[in-house]
Amino acid sequence: QNFYDVLLRRFLEVGDAIYTSGNGGPELGRYDQLNALTQTLYAMAQDSPQCAGAVFGRRLGIMQKALAKRLRDEEFVAADDEDAPSAWPSTGTILLLRALPHIFPVTDLRHVVVTPALIFLSQTVAQCPIRSLGDV
């Protein structure tokens, strides 16, 4: 369980680094790192789906709490303040949600990971304000 959580956190860090610094050239190859991490997460989810689902579910809970805090903080920001931090999730979080259908089956009516992820994504799209071009 700990290793799966470490891989998820690494995925988020690499995804955030892509936003700030790009691919990093052939020596870093952040896109290749994300591909390798996705393949590893998939293989581990196939080997131990209960463990992977539990860890991913906890990570989604952490993401949801962070979103709720950012939305609360957003209430105290002036509407014309473009220097304020965005309430939108980081690039790493969005990329992790994008990798989710490659790791878990999305065709299930109710899935222990996919359904909460869809609710998180729906809440994000419905409640996060667009304050700058970077939010789009």
Image: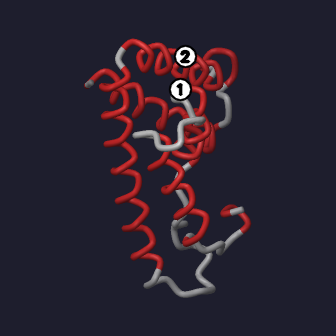
Colour scheme: secondary structure
82 versus 80 height, above or below: above
For label 1, count other residues whose C-alpha is less than 10 Å away and answer few (under 14), some (14-19) or many (20+).
some
The amino acid type of the residue labelled 1 equals: Ile
Q: Residue 103 carries which label?
A: 1
- Please tell me which residue lies in front, 85 or 106: 106
- Please tell me which residue lies in front, 40 or 112: 112
For label 2, count other residues whose C-alpha is less than 10 Å away and answer few (under 14), some (14-19) or many (20+).
some
Asked if labels 2 and 1 touch by Cβ distance under 8 angstroms, the answer is no
Q: What separation in Å lies between label 1 and label 2 (alpha carbons)?
A: 8 Å
Q: Quadrant of the N terminus?
A: top left
- In the visual, does 7 lie left or right of 24? left
80 versus 15 height, above or below: below
Instruction: Provide residue 53's location: percent of width, then percent of height.
Output: 37, 32
Instruction: Provide residue 52's location: percent of width, then percent of height.
Output: 36, 27
Q: Which residue is drawn at 61% across and 20% down?
A: 35
58 versus 84 height, above or below: above
Quarter assignment of residue 125: bottom right
Task: Residue at the far left: name it.
Answer: 2
- Please tell me which residue lies in front, 58 or 132: 58
Mark closer to the chain start, 1 or 2 = 2
What kind of element bears circle 1? helix
Q: Which residue is drawn at 55% across and 30% down?
A: 105
Q: Residue at x 69, y 16 (%)?
A: 26
Q: Residue at x 59, y 39 (%)?
A: 95
Instruction: Provide residue 113's location: percent of width, then percent of height.
Output: 43, 40
Instruction: Provide residue 93's location: percent of width, then percent of height.
Output: 52, 45
- In the visual, does 135 lie left or right of 53? right
The amino acid type of the residue labelled 2 equals: Gln
The residue that label 2 is drawn on is 39
